[in-house]
Image (spheres, rainbow, N blue to C red):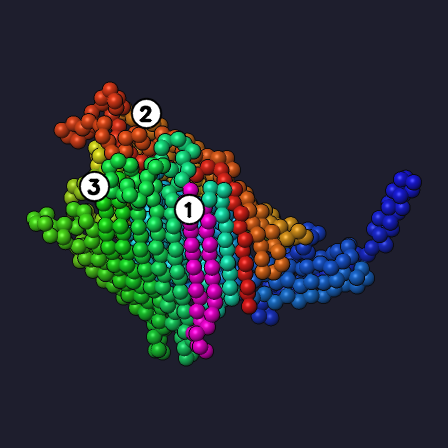
């Protein structure tokens, strides 16, 4: 009986195969009724696909019957889908119309030239990362999200309070300018706190420019810039929610809501909340491994429809955070005391920014931003209170004349900073002297179209700092592209400058139980950079896309501000370098997509960051020679399931030791943080996701905090010059120091989340 059943089953299968007929699925892909070449077309579920030809046509042979979803995709455009029924007897003709989108390799970017331009047409290399890129490894802040961007590394600066900054190509956080919608609202105090509390549900994309951008953006844009672009209200979902939690007890919530205020005003509202209140000490050093934090952020953005479609947009954000790290038994009653060590930080920050297009015949815009930051922190017994206010205004005038694209700008930045340290005190009296800096500037840019495939960008900027005087910043960018724009070469050279910011420089000291010493009036840093960039796009006839983006960079610094951790273990001594510093290297990015649903994004950076003074060359602290990142994804179309495997790898970094007797390793080990995630779609509105972070369970050494058992240095004996004297109770001559840190202390953990999106 069983054999008879198997016989009939085989007969039915053979009959089905024998009588099925091959159907040719034909169609065209159009953009604004014009044929599109190299569009990827594939049939979900059976792994077959094709690429459109010069006439926009494609053909796919299907030898199965049923209902299938045909999907057409192309970088820079929204994916189009149609559902067809294959009857098995007739060919089918389809027409797909693609619409432009804000994501993709050829999307519109603004960071390189301060004007909207196609990424491939931009003479300045700009890397673009869409919201979907960050969804492959969800995190509670933009700071952590950047860990999978090639050449960009979030650096934890303190083992206790876990504050950090962003390194680009090995350059520390003060050299990175962070903008939101093109406005420089994140600087100074916000260098370490400004990237938390941005509702990720409202982020459209993140643009990264590596290398000096001071010609357009002024001070701080020495190593590069990160521009967080939020969604336009008319393009955002009607409502969205994203909640996830981890096995350590972390919980993060993002909410987004689109609404209208009357007939001409569209609004976008966002809320971010993060909560973590679970002290864990897995490395058994007596200190919690990850700071506890309660954070709440509100974001509001409006667009006003004006006559002749003139632009007016305005946004505001407020963030409050209460975070602390320290010994496991620390409580609020111990804040500022000398019995139980803790670092407690209250942060209150507001921001507003916007763009208003003037009602003139010429293209003129007024851009503005303002922010206020109040800091109330305690690091052990050290009390730090600071206030900062920054106002920024900028007029730009754009003019196109034949082969020239001119941009003229007038800018002004006002910075007020005051704290309770000697940095803002009058040396001759007990009075407090807040730091007030006026920074007016003017810049001119001309993009010259030499030929249809060549362009030259010339730019110059002049700033007058009320303390440091005149600063001059030129740049030049050359672009050459093939006729089909599948190959683009760029060569850039420019100057960057940075004015020292008190809080930016001494934050490591405050969180590391060290005294700040300024040996001189710090002069502005100057850098000169050369960057060569080559982009190559490859399309195959089987629906595969491969994108290669390689760069070689060289940056030379003068007057560089160098923190000296090693002369005195109780001090960080800041001075302008009497010599030079160099950052050089190469990087390569790879983007690939296959018609069967497999995607790959990977990158690697090899670099050398060194300092030379008095003929002695040394490697910069906390800088890796090699870093790599990857993100692999695969979509099981029939199951509505996506798998994402993300990770990074870093080579050894030179770490700050407390002296020749310090027995901690001078270099960190090779390490890698890897994550895996599964995402399941539940209809059109819901999806759930979950996975494991830090699969390899990598954590730094347990002795990263020197003398964690004596955080107030009660058993440390100091010599007359401030150096530590070895004693029987302290044979290595160490002090309490949490600045020996290169990676998060958080080990393996699971996470689970759910997303809801209501488009209309």
| Mark 2 vs mark 3, CA separation in Å | 25 Å
SS class of the residue under badge 2? Answer: loop
SS class of the residue under badge 3? Answer: strand
Q: Residue visible at 90% across and 39% down? A: 3
Q: Are marks 2 and 3 in contact (CB under 8 Å)?
A: no
- Given the current orientation, which residue lies at the most extreme top position? 728
Q: Are marks 1 and 2 in contact (CB under 8 Å)?
A: no
Q: Nearer the viewer, mark 3 or mark 1?
A: 1
Q: Is residue 232 above or below residue 334?
A: below
Disc number at residue 276? 1
Q: Nearer the viewer, residue 36 or 360?
A: 360
Left or right: residue 711 versus residue 436 is: right
Quick one: quadrant of the N terminus? top right
**Which of the marked residues, 3 or 1, is nearer the chain's N terminus?**
1
Q: Which residues are magenta?
A: 250-278
Left or right: residue 433 versus residue 350 is: left
Residue under label 2 = 663
- Can residue 525 be seen in this snapshot? no
Q: Is residue 91 above or below residue 559?
A: below
Quarter where residue 705 is shown? top left
**Which of the marked residues, 1 or 2, is nearer the chain's N terminus?**
1
Quarter where residue 357 is shown? bottom left
Q: Position of residue 499 (x, y in %)?
A: 24, 51
Q: Nearer the viewer, residue 79 or 603?
A: 79
- Given the current orientation, which residue lies at the most extreme front position? 333
Residue under label 3 = 516
| Mark 1 vs mark 2, CA separation in Å | 34 Å
Task: Say few, some or many: other residues with alpha carbon within 10 Å of mark 3 (under 14 / 14 to 19 / 20 or more).
Answer: many
Q: Nearer the viewer, mark 1 or mark 2?
A: 1
Q: Is residue 364 magenta?
A: no
Q: Residue visible at 84% across and 48% down? A: 13
């Amino acid at each position: 009986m069983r054999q008879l059943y198997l016989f009939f089953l085989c007969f039915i299968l053979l009959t089905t195969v024998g009588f099925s007929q091959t159907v040719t699925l034909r169609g065209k892909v159009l953009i604004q009724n014009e044929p599109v070449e190299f569009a990827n077309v594939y049939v979900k579920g059976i792994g077959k696909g094709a690429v459109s030809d010069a006439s926009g046509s494609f053909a796919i042979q299907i030898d199965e019957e049923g209902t299938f979803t045909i999907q057409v995709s192309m970088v820079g455009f929204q994916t189009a889908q149609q559902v067809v029924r294959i009857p098995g007897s007739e060919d089918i003709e389809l027409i797909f119309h693609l619409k432009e989108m804000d994501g993709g390799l050829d999307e519109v970017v603004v960071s390189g030239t301060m004007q909207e331009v196609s990424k491939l047409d931009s003479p300045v290399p700009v890397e673009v990362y869409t919201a979907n890129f960050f969804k492959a490894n969800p995190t509670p802040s933009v700071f952590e999200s950047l860990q999978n961007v090639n050449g960009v590394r979030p650096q934890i600066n303190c083992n206790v309070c876990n504050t950090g900054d962003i390194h680009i190509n090995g350059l520390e956080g003060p050299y990175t300018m962070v903008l939101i919608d093109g406005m420089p609202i994140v600087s100074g105090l916000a260098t370490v706190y400004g990237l938390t509390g941005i509702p990720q549900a409202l982020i459209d994309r993140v643009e990264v420019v590596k290398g000096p951008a001071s010609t357009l953006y002024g001070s701080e844009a020495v190593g590069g810039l990160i521009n967080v672009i939020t969604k336009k209200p008319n393009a955002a979902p009607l409502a969205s929610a994203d909640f996830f939690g981890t096995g350590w007890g972390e919980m993060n919530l993002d909410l987004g809501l689109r609404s209208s205020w009357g007939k001409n005003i569209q609004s976008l509202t966002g809320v971010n909340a993060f909560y973590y209140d679970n002290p864990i000490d897995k490395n058994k050093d007596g200190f919690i491994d990850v700071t506890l934090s309660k954070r709440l952020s509100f974001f509001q953005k409006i667009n006003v429809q004006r006559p002749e479609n003139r632009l007016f947009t305005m946004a505001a954000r407020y963030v409050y955070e209460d975070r602390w790290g320290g010994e496991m038994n620390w409580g609020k009653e111990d804040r500022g005391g000398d019995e139980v060590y803790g670092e407690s930080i209250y942060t209150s920050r507001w921001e507003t920014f916007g763009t208003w297009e003037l009602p003139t015949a010429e293209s003129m815009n007024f851009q503005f931003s303002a922010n206020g930051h109040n800091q109330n922190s305690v690091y052990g017994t050290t009390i730090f209170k600071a206030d900062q206010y920054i106002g920024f205004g900028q007029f730009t005038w754009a003019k196109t004349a034949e082969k020239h694209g001119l941009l003229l700008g007038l800018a002004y930045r006002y910075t007020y900073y005051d704290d309770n340290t000697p940095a803002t005190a009058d040396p001759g009296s007990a009075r407090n002297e807040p730091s007030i800096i006026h920074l007016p500037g003017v810049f001119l840019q001309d993009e010259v179209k030499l030929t249809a495939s060549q362009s030259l960008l010339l730019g110059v900027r002049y700033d007058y700092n009320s303390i440091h005087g005149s600063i001059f910043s030129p740049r030049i960018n050359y672009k050459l592209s093939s006729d089909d724009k599948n190959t683009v070469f760029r060569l850039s050279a420019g100057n960057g400058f940075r004015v020292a910011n008190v809080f930016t420089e001494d934050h490591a000291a405050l969180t590391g139980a060290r005294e700040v010493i300024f040996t001189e009036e710090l002069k502005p840093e100057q850098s000169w950079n050369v960057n060569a960039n080559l982009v190559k796009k490859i399309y195959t006839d089987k629906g595969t896309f491969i994108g290669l983006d390689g760069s070689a960079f060289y940056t030379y610094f003068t007057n560089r501000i160098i923190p000296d951790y090693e002369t005195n273990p109780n001090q960080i001594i800041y001075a302008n370098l009497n010599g030079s510093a160099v950052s050089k290297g190469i990087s390569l990015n790879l983007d690939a997509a296959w018609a069967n649903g497999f995607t790959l994004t990977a990158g690697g950076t090899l670099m050398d960051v060194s300092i030379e003074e008095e003929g002695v060359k040394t490697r910069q602290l906390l800088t890796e020679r090699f870093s790599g990142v990857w993100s692999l994804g695969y979509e099981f179309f029939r199951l509505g399931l996506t798998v994402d495997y993300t990770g990074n790898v870093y080579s050894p970094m030179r770490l700050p030791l407390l002296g020749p007797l310090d027995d901690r390793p001078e270099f960190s080990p090779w390490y890698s943080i890897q994550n895996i995630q599964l995402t399941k779609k539940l209809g059109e509105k819901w999806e759930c996701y979950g996975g494991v972070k830090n699969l390899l369970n990598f954590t730094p050494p347990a002795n990263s905090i020197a003398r964690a058992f004596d955080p107030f240095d009660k058993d440390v004996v100091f010599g007359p010059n401030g150096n530590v004297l070895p004693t029987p109770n302290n044979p290595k001559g160490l002090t309490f120091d949490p600045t020996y840190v290169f990676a998060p202390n958080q080990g393996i953990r699971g996470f689970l989340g759910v997303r809801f999106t209501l488009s209309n």
